[in-house]
Amino acid sequence: MNPSRRGPLALAAVLLLLASACTTRAPEPVAASAYGAYVGYEPADVGRLDALGAWLGGPPPRVGHVYLPGDRWSNIEGAPGYLESWAAWRRADPRRMFVLNVPMLEHTEAHLPDSTVRAELRRGAHGDHDGHFRTLARRLAALGVPDTIVVLGWEMNGTTYTHRCGPDPAAWKAYWTRIVRAMRSVPGQRLRFEFTPNRGRDAIPWPRCYPGDGVVDIIGMDAYDAPRGLSFTDHVTEPYGLRAHVRFARAHRKPFSYQEWGLYENGDDPAYMRGMLTWFARERPLYQAITDYCPHGVWGCRAHQRSSAVYRSRMR
């Protein structure tokens, strides 16, 4: 078709169509979803999060992400002093999100046997640990962060943590429900609770651990570049992978997120980085937070120069 023979309106329509095609082919920026990173948990690391945003040269990070130690109950109750610094960061801007990983049991990385885990989950399901979590909820409210996103018992479908689901899924779900109800009973709290398995099947299919829509606000996923040699297409299509995660969340009418993701067993892998950032741009999670230290990161790990370039170009 020759546009010059179809009049100015037709010419304008053609130009608009061509512009639309060019826009479709261009990489889509990711920063429309809230983003952040785990860059450490000490008070000085609050400044490092801001430095990550300056390095990117785009919108500043809106997600601060830290973990509570699971070595003993007092720490799970929120005793670590660094919470005060992160709470101050959150309070400084109402658009920010504070994401806090909370273990469900003490001795959380002690590699306890299944029989011990099973017994502890059942104790929790009967309410033996409710008081610890009410204490945490009161502490978060007192710090001025009553709207914290609590990532409770993350990676429960794996074997790393004592709060794993596999030894007794029914007790695990009952215990999760007890914790959420205990924390929600605290006046003034507006906490959101995030259910976050590892990507893929791992030790148990993660839907078997899902405790129910009434006690879950966000459905997350930890998605690292593993195992070695797995293509990004496989990350999407594998059983209980990225596609299954998004479909599950939408079927349950829940927002979804990626509170941990990054490089791992395939080293400097720009294809994985490009795949994840494209996935975020297309699916629009509530938020995403890269784990930014070696072997996972791009800003805090100089060995990943090619992946770093992809991340920086797509996050501006």
Image (spheres, rainbow, N blue to C red):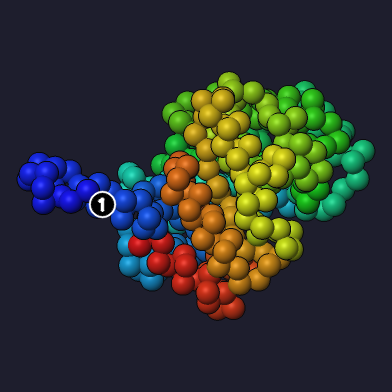
The picture quadrant where one finds residue 266 is bottom right
- For image coordinates 58% across by 21% down, the residue present is 214
The picture quadrant where one finds residue 203 is top right
Amino acid type, label 1: Leu
Where in the figure is residue 197, as x and y percent of width and height?
67, 42
Q: Count up the numbered dots.
A: 1
- Label 1's element? helix
- For image coordinates 56% across by 37% down, the residue present is 246
Where in the figure is residue 44, as x and y percent of width and height?
47, 67
In the displayed structure, does residue 122 sit left or right of residue 261?
A: right
Residue behind mark 1: 18
Q: Is residue 161 above or below residue 304?
A: above
Q: Quadrant of the C terminus?
A: bottom left
Instruction: Please indicate, yes or no, whether residue 305 appears anywhere in the rendered image.
Output: yes
In the displayed structure, does residue 304 sit left or right of residue 11?
A: right
Where in the figure is residue 38, as x and y percent of width and height?
54, 59
In the displayed structure, does residue 229 sit left or right of residue 247?
A: right
Q: Is residue 138 above or below residue 223?
A: above
Instruction: Please indicate, yes or no, whether residue 300 appears anywhere in the rendered image.
Output: no
Q: Nearer the viewer, residue 244 or 23?
A: 23
In the displayed structure, does residue 208 sit left or right of residue 95?
A: right
Furthest residue in direction top, as rendered: 214
Q: Nearer the viewer, residue 146 or 278?
A: 278
Where in the figure is residue 102, as x and y percent of width and height?
63, 44
- For image coordinates 63% across by 37% down, the residue present is 244
- For image coordinates 35% across by 51% down, the residue present is 24
Q: Nearer the viewer, residue 232 or 53?
A: 232
Q: Is disc 1 surrounded by few (<14), some (14 to 19) or many (20+) residues within 10 Å?
A: few
